[in-house]
Image (cartoon, grey):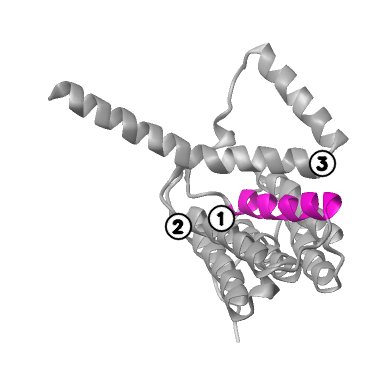
Amino acid sequence: MGERRGIKRGIYLLPNLITTGALFGGFYAIIAALSGELELACTAIVIAGFLDALDGRIARLTNTATEFGVQYDSMSDLVAFGVAPSILLYSWSLNELGKLGWIIAFLYVCCTALRLARFNTAPDSKVFFGLPSPMAAGVLATLVWTWVDNFSAIESVSFSSGVGLFVSIAALLMVSNIKYYNPKNIKGQVPFRYMLLVVLMFVSILIYPPGILLFIGLVYGASGPVSAFLRLFNKEAKNLDSD
């Protein structure tokens, strides 16, 4: 039986190796969460996020971007930023809600899959439509990390309900049409003060990773709805002025 035509047998090692590292981070986060090692699970998801940010850039810089790499990256993202965060949040708090808890956890996984599928089939854009799944997962992971690092466990339905609402909002933001800034658009020279801000940000992260990363994630997550509201407000104001 002859070989099928049109199928490349080889793959580029470096970018796919980094993607595999992100996939392992998601897998390890699941194992850690199920074992009650919540901080390790959070750390693994955050590391997976940094690796995910690297693989695509390295593929473009080395001219090794392929359709295989795109699809493999999405499979990795579904595990690291969909399944792993949902199991982490369920192990931490959502289990207190019983059946509703795992429904919310599944909603998050489903929305992550939909977000990734839409991203893969949409044309290239200067903005993201919907909250990127790595950022959503990062917010949830650093939320758990910050809480576990500073507070004792709270086993109450009211607290878990609040967590469930937060997870649901993150899930729905991923599949929304709200526009988010795409950092890939940073090209050319930027003012020197921006570099100072980046340095301060990295120093802050080194001092207290979970809290600073959570703050950055929350600001980015809120930037989409706030910008959408401001655009709508300005549009309504212009319509009133024209009338």
Task: Identify the amino acid type marked 2.
Answer: Thr
Quickly name the residue at label 1: 170
Quarter of the rendering occupied by the C terminus? top left
Quickly name the residue at label 2: 121
Q: Secondary structure at mark 1?
A: helix
Instruction: Choose between 82 and 21: the one closer to the eye.
Output: 82
Q: Earlier in the sequence, mark 1 or mark 3?
A: 1
Quarter of the rendering occupied by the N terminus? bottom right
Q: x, y percentage for residue 127?
A: 47, 39
Give the magenta part as a residue range: 133-151
Look at discs 1 and 2 and give the one toward the viewer.
Answer: 1
Q: Is residue 145 magenta?
A: yes
Q: Secondary structure at mark 3?
A: helix
Task: Identify the amino acid type marked 3.
Answer: Pro
Could you tell me which residue is drawn at 73 percent across and 25 percent down?
A: 198
Could you tell me which residue is drawn at 69 percent across and 74 percent down?
A: 95
Q: Secondary structure at mark 2?
A: helix
Question: How many neighbours does mark 2 have within 10 angstroms: few (below 14), some (14-19), or many (20 or more)?
Answer: few
Q: x, y percentage for residue 65?
A: 62, 49
Magenta residues: mostly which secondary structure? helix
- Residue 155, by quadrant, is bottom right
**Residue 224 seen by the camera:** yes
Q: x, y percentage for residue 223?
A: 52, 37
Could you tell me which residue is drawn at 65 percent across and 46 percent down?
A: 56
Quickly name the residue at label 3: 209
Q: Is residue 238 magenta?
A: no
Contact flag, marks 1 and 3 (Cβ < 8 Å):
no
